[in-house]
Structure formats: structure tokens, C-alpha cells
Image (cartoon, grey):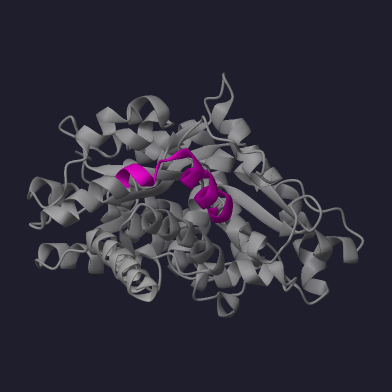
Amino acid sequence: MGLKKFAAGLAFTASLFAMGAAKATDIEVTHWWTSGGEAAAVAEFAKAVNASGDHWVDGAIAGSGDVARPIIISRILGGNPMGATQLNPGHDADELIKAGLMQDLTDVAKKENWDGILRPKTQLASCTVDGKVWCVPVNLHSAQWLWTNRHVYEKLGLQPPKDWNEFVADAPKLKAAGIQPMALAQGWPVGLLIQDLMVAVAGVDGFVKVYKDRDLGVAGGPDFAKVFKAVEDARSMVDPKDMTKQWNEAVALVITGKAGGVVHGDWSGGEFQVAKMVPGKDYDCLPGLGLTPVLNTGGDVFYFPKSKDPKITEAQLKMASTLVKPDVQVAFNLKKGSLPMRGDVDLSAANDCMKKGLEILDHPKSNAVFPNDVQMLDRDSLNQINDLMTQFFSTPAMTAADVQKKFVDIIKAAPPMK
């Protein structure tokens, strides 16, 4: 009799477990986080969603956002939507929202006071169309960083560079020692490098005047002439044949000491962390290339395509809420290298690079936080600029004056943002 009761108890427990498991909803999540640091970070999101009672089905798309975005958008337009998808702040999803294909998150945002707890304000603003919230910002990424390997310089008897100018000045010594002065990846990282130089050399105001206000006088003027001279300096530090295919491969050259440094976003910090390197000891991270400490309001957001299944809709709204919970924000961003969207979280475990970013972001008198490129200029124009800069790097005969003139033409032809 005891065994029968025990067996019955096991059966009852199993039935309860089955009932609980049945309530879990699979939610396919597409994203392009596939490098070492990115994979470690996205695992934190997956863990949190699974702990909420639903099931994260990973839909990673290999390659960059430029590869993933068209795939993501075509799936949604083609009637085969995922449950959730990563995109960047900006206007990539405007047409999908207009077509009624995205889930409205306004009720969740109001209930949880996203407008009050998420910063900077521009991030949630980029998710807001016609007064409604359509996406959830999960981090703040900034692009303007110079990352250098301290050991490379110290072994040559050099002080690690403190800014872009010292980085350029040390380049011939690294070349003489058989070390690539600067690592660079093909494609969008080239455009990112140029933008970073625009901000560092011409300043935030100059960059915003050109990208947002379409000021052709500034774009074709002396301040931007200095920018393209700096681009020439950059071109002298990397042979086109040494450019890597992926951004994380360029960062890996710096981590392994095969290159002195790389100009790239703060997501590079996740790669250094995976390599167990310590900022200030093994490497340096210099916001604004050490010239102009700034943060642009880039980052990642999640959209949720509409579903006819009420269970998926419920899971989507739960996931949107989960991604901005304090403990989830900390766990994800510490591994991603980005800054959390909330200012009320415990970041005692933050490394020196994250602390530098937070100091800029949260300084009471800071005016060094500015919009991301996709918040000011359309994606097609940005791609044209990337193509132009890639051509410049592979064409020694092309002068700084040549590229500046073509750059002005692209800005002049760019359509107004909505």
C-alpha cells in the first residue's frame, strides 16, 4: 500500500510538472550576437526568459547587423515572423509599424514607468512612434573608443598612447617591429572608424550639424578637411590586405598583440573580458579616442512582431518586461560591454571601461551624449558613406579632398528623416 501511495504521489507530482511545462511558450528570438562576448551576454537574456516560465529559442544570424536586418525584415513582411528580434535604435522598423506588423508595448511601458527609469531619453524616444512604444531598449552602446594593448607598447619601451595623436605617432615604431599599428575590419567598421574620427576631430556639434542638420558648409569646410586628413593617417596604418572580415577578428588581433590598437565600439570590451584581460593593466579603453570623451546613443532594442496566438503575445509582453529588470540589465551589460538602460542598478562589479562610460553618461553637466547615426541619417546614405570609405582605404591615389567632396554629395542627396 505504501508503494502504491508513493507511486501515486510521483504520478501526481509529474502531472503538476507537466501542467507547468505546458504553460511555457516557445519564443524564437533573432539577433546577430555571435562573437564570444556577445554570446556570453545573450545567454544571460536567455536564462532570464527561461526563468520567467517561457522558453527562449535562439535564432542567431551569423554576420553583422547589415546581414541580419534584411533577413529579419523579410521574414516579418513574408508572414513568417519570429517572436522577438534585435534591431538598433532608429528607423529600421518604421514601415513594419506602419503596416501594423509590430506589437504595441505602450501598456507595459506605462505600467513599468520606462520613461522614468530608462536613460538617456533618446533611447525610448527612438522606440516611440505616434505616441506609442514599439520596442524595448536594452543597452546603451557607444562607438567612439580607442582600444590598445598595453603590452605591445611596453615591450617596445613605449608608453601606451593616451589619445589618437599619440597612437598615430607611435605607428612607425610598431611597423618597424613587425606589428600592425591598427586593426580594422571590412565593411561597416570602416564607416564607424570615420564617424569616430569626425566626432573626435570636428567635435560633437560638427558631427550633428552634418548628419542631422545636413549642413553642407560644415561638411565641405576646414573642420571636416581635418577629419579626412586624420582618415589618411588611419589609412597609412593598415594595409587593405590585412583587414579582417569580421569586427571581432580585428579586436582579436589587438588582444593577441598582433596589432597595437583598434578604433571600435564598447562592445569590444566583451571580447577583452572573455580573454580575461584587465583594463589599465593589459589594455586601455579611451572614450572619444582620448581626444573628446563622448558617448553616442547607439545600442540595441527588441521588437516583437504581432502574432495571432494569444500565448505568444503574452510571452512577448512578459519578455519585454523581463529584459529591463534590474538584475537582468546588470548581468547582460556586464558581459556585453555596454551600459545598462537603468540608472538604479548595482554596478559595483563594473570594470574601469564601463565606469568611464557611466561617468560621461551620468555627469550632471554632461553635454557629450548625442544621437546615433541611424537616428539622424537614413540607412541607404550610411551604406553609401561606408562604401565610399572602403573605396578610400583600398585606393591609395584617392586623396582626402576627393573623399570629402564625394562625402558632401552623399549628405546633400540624403532624404529628410521622418
Question: Quadrant of residue 248 in the image?
Answer: bottom right
Q: Main SS of the magenta segment?
A: helix
Camera-side residue: 361 or 296? 361
271 above or below 405? below
Q: Residue furthest top?
A: 365
Q: Which residues are magenta?
A: 320-336
Query: Does the rendering let one see residue 294?
Result: yes
Q: Is residue 69 left or right of residue 225?
A: left
Q: Residue furthest bottom?
A: 241
Q: Is residue 86 left or right of residue 37?
A: left
As for residue 224 lying within the magenta part, the answer is: no
- Quadrant where the C terminus sits is top left
x and y percentages locating residue 86 in the rendered image: 33, 56
209 above or below 98? above
x and y percentages locating residue 281 in the rendered image: 81, 54
x and y percentages locating residue 49 in the rendered image: 37, 55
Q: Residue furthest front?
A: 1
Residue plotted at (66% across, 61% down):
272
Camera-side residue: 9 or 78? 9
Query: Does the rendering let one see residue 181?
Result: no
- Quadrant where the N terminus sits is bottom left
Camera-side residue: 391 or 40? 40
x and y percentages locating residue 228 in the rendered image: 53, 51
As for residue 326 lying within the magenta part, the answer is: yes
Residue plotted at (55% across, 68% down):
36
Camera-side residue: 226 or 2? 2
201 above or below 147? above
18 above or below 193? below
Residue plotted at (34% across, 47% down):
374
